[in-house]
């Protein structure tokens, strides 16, 4: 999930070609369906994104009580209205608001956080912020102009699983829990990691992956020079299979040998002082580790038509096209940064994935 906030932005209004009483309010490349004449182009609005939990007073003000998603009918979810994908809600700006302001707290909006299954929880300890990678991928619709037309890029398939950090620090810097630093996305953001030897973590999904892959020995061999020089390595991957999310890719979590795991990033150095590997180096590192990378769907010059072509379709992870593709992750082939975004890495999400029923979003 990318960063979550309700910001005050300027909206662009476009006609809805299939509904006389509706219009399209565009924020970046996000589109939200609104009543005709409700807003004008250039007007300030608050954009309430998907996964927002909207409080009852605001639902009443918007006339949406009982009309949103979730068991309490108060969660914002993508829907299709008269043939157009609608993502998020548009709320008129209050007189005291200014462009760029974060009004999440003022509106009482919360981010939807599903309960995490027990096998994805466990006993944790404070590993520290330099031993845990903070990670988010923003949507290309929020930053439509960051990737440059013709820029050499790589598109990889986005897998609907759970984010996993497998880290290894130099032995002389290891604390009481040893050099292996295993964490989930939510925990890593807080500088926390799973306690490797805790009895209550015996069935923890992330530690099972680390043990099954013999990660400590594998990474120690491949990154021996980095570790000897005092630089840790963090291999980031997606764990998937039945019991993780609603899309399983033909894998299972009941036995270690059936677990699905694919690498999507490698960071070398203490977090905040090192960097992510560029495409070619990442490919070489995955080969040396003998760990599969997430499927590479395209390498070549960037253009929006090619992005759209690869965003939708069937998944390629299983080799059997078992279900819908979540989308793609887009990066320059050579790592670079952008003043507004930071690291240049974006996701493009499939419309069919967004509209599927019974979806889960555990982190």
Image (cartoon, rainbow, N blue to C red):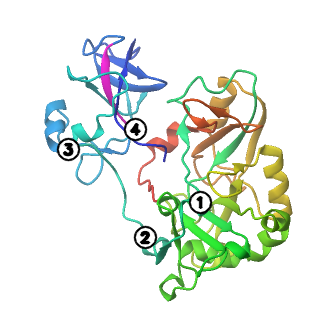
Which residue lies at the image location 59% right of the left edge and 59% below the top edge?
130
Q: Nearer the viewer, mark 3 or mark 1?
A: 1
Q: Is residue 74 above or below residue 44?
A: below
Query: Image quadrant of residue 7?
Result: top left
**Mark on residue 78?**
4
Residue for point 69% across, 69% down? 169
**Circle 2 is placed at which residue position?**
117
Q: Which residue is mark 1?
A: 130
Q: CA distance from mark 1 to mark 2?
A: 27 Å
The stretch of residues the image draws in magenta is: 43-49
Q: CA distance from mark 2 to mark 4?
A: 24 Å
From the image, tell me which residue sits under label 3.
55
Residue 173 location (% of width, % of height):
68, 72
Of callouts 3 and 2, which one flags the residue occurring earlier in the amino acid sequence?
3
**In this rendering, does residue 363 appear at all?**
no
Q: Could you tell which of marks 1 and 2 lies nearer the N-terminus?
A: 2
**N-term-proximal mark, 3 vs 1:** 3
Within-10-Å neighbours for mark 2: few <14, some 14–19, many 20+: few
Report the mark closest to the observer, 1 or 2: 1
Q: Earlier in the sequence, mark 2 or mark 4?
A: 4
Q: Nearer the viewer, residue 66 or 93?
A: 93
Q: Tell me which numbered mark, 4 or 3, is placed earlier along the sequence.
A: 3
Residue 315 placement (x, y as % from top left): 64, 49
Residue 330 % position (x, y): 66, 37
Q: Residues within 10 Å of mark 3 (few under 14, many from 20)?
A: some
Q: Nearer the viewer, mark 1 or mark 4?
A: 1
């Amino acid at each position: 999930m990318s960063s979550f906030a309700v910001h005050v932005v300027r909206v662009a209004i476009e006609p809805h070609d299939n509904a006389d009483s509706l219009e399209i309010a565009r924020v970046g490349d996000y589109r939200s369906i609104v009543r005709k004449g409700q807003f004008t182009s250039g007007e300030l609005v608050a954009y309430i994104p998907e996964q927002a939990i909207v409080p009852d007073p605001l639902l009443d003000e918007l006339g949406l009580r009982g009309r949103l998603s979730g068991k309490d009918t108060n969660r914002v979810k993508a829907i299709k209205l008269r043939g157009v994908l609608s993502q998020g809600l548009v709320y008129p700006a209050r007189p005291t608001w200014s462009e760029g302001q974060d009004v999440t707290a003022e509106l009482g909006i919360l981010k939807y956080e599903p309960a995490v299954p027990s096998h994805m929880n466990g006993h944790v300890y404070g590993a520290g912020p330099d031993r845990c990678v903070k990670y988010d991928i923003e949507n290309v619709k929020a930053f439509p102009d960051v990737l440059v037309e013709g820029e050499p890029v790589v598109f990889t398939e986005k897998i609907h699983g759970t984010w996993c950090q497998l880290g290894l620090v130099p032995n002389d810097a290891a604390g009481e829990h040893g050099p292996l630093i295993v964490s989930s996305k939510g925990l890593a953001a807080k500088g926390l990691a799973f306690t490797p030897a805790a009895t209550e973590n015996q069935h923890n999904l992330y530690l099972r992956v680390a043990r099954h892959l013999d990660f400590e020995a594998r990474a120690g061999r491949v990154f021996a020079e980095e570790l000897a020089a005092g630089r840790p390595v963090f291999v980031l991957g997606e764990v998937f299979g039945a019991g993780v999310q609603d899309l399983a890719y033909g894998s299972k979590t009941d036995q270690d040998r059936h677990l699905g795991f694919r690498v999507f990033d490698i960071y070398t150095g203490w977090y905040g002082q090192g960097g992510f590997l560029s495409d070619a180096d990442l490919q070489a590192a995955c080969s040396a580790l003998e760990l599969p990378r997430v499927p590479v769907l395209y390498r070549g010059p960037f253009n929006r038509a090619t992005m759209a072509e690869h965003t939708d379709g069937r998944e390629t992870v299983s080799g059997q096209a078992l279900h819908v593709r979540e989308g793609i992750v887009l990066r320059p082939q050579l790592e670079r940064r952008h003043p507004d975004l930071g690291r240049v890495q974006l996701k493009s999400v499939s419309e069919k994935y967004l509209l599927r029923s019974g979806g889960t979003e555990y982190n």
